Image: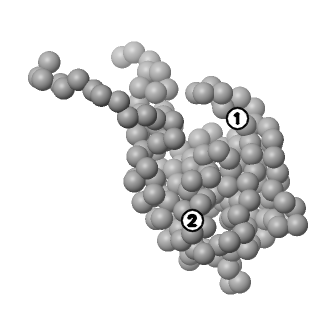
Amino acid sequence: MTDRLPHEKGFHVSWDQLHRDARALAWRLQDEAPEEGWRAVVAITRGGMAPAMIVARELDIRAVDTISVKSYDHQTQSEPRVIKRPDPDLVGDGTGVLIVDDLVDTGKTLEVVRAALPRAHVATVYAKPMGRELVHTFVTEVSQDTWIFFPWDMALQYVEPYRGR
């Protein structure tokens, strides 16, 4: 057996699928909300922005901010670093705040985010085993060696018919 490149065991997510999965995440989160409800949503940029917008809409949360953590250059992961922090007056220590991302992979990004907002509830649409313990709520688990192709990374193009070859 040959070693696969990261993109060779791919899970392709369409916009429709992402929307359905983000709505499913919102449905799970409604039962996890503190008694007074979620105060704010913080999206981890960039991948968490689309799911966070959908979750915020579904749960009628109007206060939305971002935390920007860079940990990938294309398909190569590096040490995460915070580029932009959310408004401290809005998020405080994270109490009543919902952090949303598209995926937890190794968990390195979430370690940085959870250190910044230790009392926040972390939710991702997809989770891989190495980082799953850092997430409170998620929708779908995929294997660690699966590369998820998100719709913002893809373009439609013509494909030759198989024709039994």
Distance (Cα) linking label 1 and label 2: 24 Å
Give amino acid for label 1: Ser
Quarter of the image with the N terminus is top left
Q: Residue 64: image x %, image y %?
A: 71, 64
In the orientation shown, which residue stands out farthest toward the left? 164
Image position, residue 61 (x, y; %) = 65, 72
- Residue at x 67%, y 55% (from the top left corner): 43
The tag on residue 12 is: none
Residue placed furthest toward the bottom: 35
Q: Quadrant of the C terminus?
A: top left
Say which residue label 2 marks.
Answer: 55
Closest to the camera, between mark 1 and mark 2, is 2
Q: Nearer the viewer, residue 147 or 160?
A: 160
Dots 1, 2 in contact, CB < 8 A: no
Q: Which residue is mark 1?
A: 71
Amino acid type shown at disc 2 = Val
